[in-house]
Image (cartoon, grey):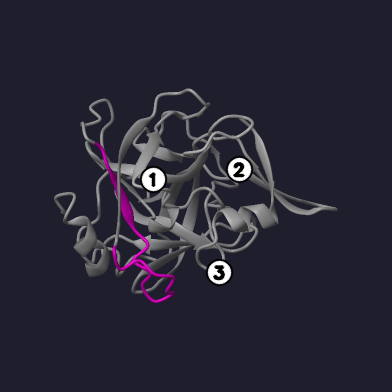
């Protein structure tokens, strides 16, 4: 389905850190390129049915990785359809967020998983990075961002509007900076990059063209065209939470 949301509504839907990110912009439909990337299905029926409100990645047959600020209750639905429509197959699991989650710029612990009661056998899970493996990346390192967020941001008399179609998208960006908890990735189209926007929150930023999820999308600039800010998964903090649910590299 195609949705058009104003800037005010987008901010209200994802009121997390000062500027929330969530979708793929200046990219392309992913098709079957990353079948282990799924979207969280809204628990409430709207006038045009259900829709996807956050993104994430299958990291084991029973564990789906996303962001803590995407919480919508204990029972959560996930769709892996590359072009979701209401009525498509949904896998339901139990929500577990990092109990230390907080809106902190230093380390927000903005990480969560959905644990499925039965393995999803038809999809190969993505991999996680080794401890500390992202600390010394080259400034030319590329990342592949995937998610179901807004695919375009327009600006007209009514202000900025965010366009959604619940299609899994993909874009590539270049490393801007590394911080203790964050990767900052350029998504500026003027430099040949693309990236995330509202709705891609929790989605993966793969290391180059590998299946290693380096970081999950958390925040970014207001109109989704400058910097994609992502929570590192190689840190002691992230690994401390994840080790309860998966075997770490």
| Front of the two marks 2 and 3 | 3
Residue linked to disc 1: 56
Above or below — where is 113 with respect to 176?
Answer: above
Residue linked to disc 2: 151
Mark 2 Cα-neighbour bin, 10 Å: few <14, some 14–19, many ≥20 = many
Quadrant housing residue 19: bottom right
Q: Give SS at disc 2.
A: loop
What is the number of the mark on residue 18?
A: 3
What is the number of the mark on residue 46?
A: none
Quarter holding the C terminus?
A: bottom left
In the image, which residues are magenta?
Answer: 99-116
Sooner in the amino-acid sequence: mark 1 or mark 3: 3
Residue at 59% over, 45% down: 150
Residue at 36% over, 72% down: 107
Percent of width and height locating residue 203: 42, 48
Between residue 109 and residue 126, name the one nearer to us.
109
Residue at 35% over, 70% down: 181
Percent of width and height locating residue 114: 30, 45
Mark 3 Cα-neighbour bin, 10 Å: few <14, some 14–19, many ≥20 = some
């Amino acid at each position: 389905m195609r949705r058009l949301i104003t800037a005010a509504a987008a901010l209200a839907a994802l009121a997390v850190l000062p500027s929330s990110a969530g979708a793929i912009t200046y990219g392309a439909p992913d098709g079957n390129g990353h079948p282990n990337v799924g979207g969280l299905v809204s628990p409430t029926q709207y006038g045009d049915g259900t829709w996807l409100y956050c993104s994430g990645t299958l990291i084991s047959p029973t564990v789906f990785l996303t962001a803590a600020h995407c919480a919508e209750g204990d029972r959560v639905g996930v769709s892996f359809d590359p072009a979701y429509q209401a009525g498509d197959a949904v896998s339901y699991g139990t929500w577990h967020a990092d109990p230390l989650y907080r809106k902190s710029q230093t380390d927000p612990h903005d990480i969560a998983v959905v644990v499925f009661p039965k393995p999803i056998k038809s999809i190969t899970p993505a991999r996680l990075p080794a401890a500390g493996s992202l600390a010394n990346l080259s400034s030319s390192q590329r990342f592949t961002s995937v998610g179901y967020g807004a695919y375009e941001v327009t600006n007209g008399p009514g202000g900025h509007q965010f366009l959604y179609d619940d299609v899994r998208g993909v874009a590539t960006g270049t490393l801007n900076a590394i911080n203790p908890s964050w990767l900052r990735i350029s998504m500026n189209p003027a430099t040949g990059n693309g990236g995330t926007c509202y709705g891609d929150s929790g989605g993966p930023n793969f290391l180059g063209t590998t299946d290693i999820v380096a970081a999950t999308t958390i925040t970014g600039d207001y109109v989704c065209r400058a910097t994609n800010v992502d929570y590192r998964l190689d840190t002691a903090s992230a690994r401390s939470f994840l080790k309860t649910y998966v075997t770490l590299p």
